[in-house]
Image (cartoon, rainbow, N blue to C red):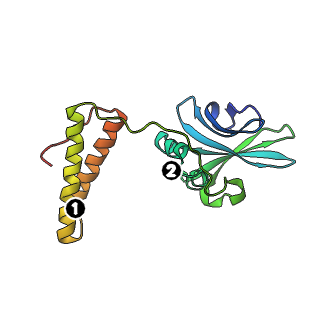
């Protein structure tokens, strides 16, 4: 592969981790100068060119792939953005080209085999450190309990309760990511 740190269409990339190496990185994660993460795999090689697939990936999903919770085939066949980027590097010296490709239009032989997994120990979710964090989690649990009670009696969850639940879940995720600007309304 040409300069693996200078990818047409993605710019300069820094390899975060190499998972498979065979004369060069074959499966790796990388990050752009803007902080976008990609999972990359060597996809095809013939007499005229070699091809690489890049899947934009969030940190959370990358950790799921690293731990083996998501297999490598699904990481590429079901990308978060709904499409992959395919870089084709010709051997004749012409410029490489990058093309977006819908995940359902990618040839199966370009993807890792179904069931292939990484098995890398990943960091667990952050531990709640103070009573305010615990109170926020308790509020989410109360909402879930309330929705379960209403579901049991009516078999449906009212739209207003669903909205509250989603708002509280969003706040919990914000808390987990370290954003402390959100406050949970205890009256709900």
Q: Look at discs 2 and 1 and give the one toward the viewer.
A: 2
Q: Which residue is mark 1?
A: 148
Vertical placement of 159 versus 131: above or below?
Answer: below
Measuring 85% from the left and 47% from the top, which residue is drawn there?
48
Find numbered disc 2 in the image and state the secondary structure of the residue it sits on: loop
Measuring 20% from the left and 53% from the top, which residue is drawn there?
143
Task: Residue 92 in the image: state x and y as whole percent.
Answer: 87, 40
**Number of residues whose C-alpha sits closer than 10 Å to that of mark 1, classed few (under 14), some (14–19) or many (20 or more):** some
Task: Residue 61 in the image: state x and y as whole percent.
Answer: 49, 45
Quadrant housing the N terminus? top right
Q: Quadrant of residue 91?
A: top right
Task: Residue 163 in the image: state x and y as whole percent.
Answer: 25, 54
Horizontally, is 71 left or right of 153 in the view?
A: right
The residue nearer to you, when weighing 48 against 122, is: 122
* Label 2 or label 1, whichever comes before in sequence order: 2
Measuring 25% from the left and 47% from the top, which residue is drawn there?
168
Disc ID at residue 3: none
Disc ID at residue 69: 2
Task: Residue 88 in the image: state x and y as whole percent.
Answer: 75, 45
Label total for image: 2
**Number of residues whose C-alpha sits closer than 10 Å to that of mark 2, classed few (under 14), some (14–19) or many (20 or more):** some
Find numbered disc 1 in the image and state the secondary structure of the residue it sits on: helix
Vertical placement of 26 versus 166: above or below?
Answer: above
């Amino acid at each position: 592969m040409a300069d693996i740190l200078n990818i047409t269409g993605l710019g300069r990339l820094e390899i975060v981790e190499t998972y498979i190496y065979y004369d060069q990185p074959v499966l790796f994660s990388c990050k752009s100068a803007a902080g976008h993460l990609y999972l990359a795999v060597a996809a095809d090689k013939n007499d005229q060119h070699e091809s690489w697939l890049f899947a934009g990936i969030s940190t959370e999903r990358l950790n799921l792939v690293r731990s083996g919770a998501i297999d490598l085939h699904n990481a590429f066949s079901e990308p978060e953005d709904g499409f992959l980027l395919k870089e084709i590097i010709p051997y004749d010296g012409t410029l490489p080209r990058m093309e977006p490709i819908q995940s359902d239009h990618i040839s199966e032989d370009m993807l890792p085999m179904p069931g292939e997994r990484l098995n890398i120990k990943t960091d667990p979710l952050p531990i709640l450190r103070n009573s305010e964090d615990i109170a926020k989690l308790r509020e989410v649990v109360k909402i879930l309990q309330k929705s379960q009670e209403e579901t049991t009696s009516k078999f449906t969850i009212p739209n207003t309760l669903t909205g509250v639940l989603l708002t509280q879940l969003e706040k919990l995720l914000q808390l987990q990511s370290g954003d402390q600007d959100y406050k949970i309304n205890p009256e709900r």
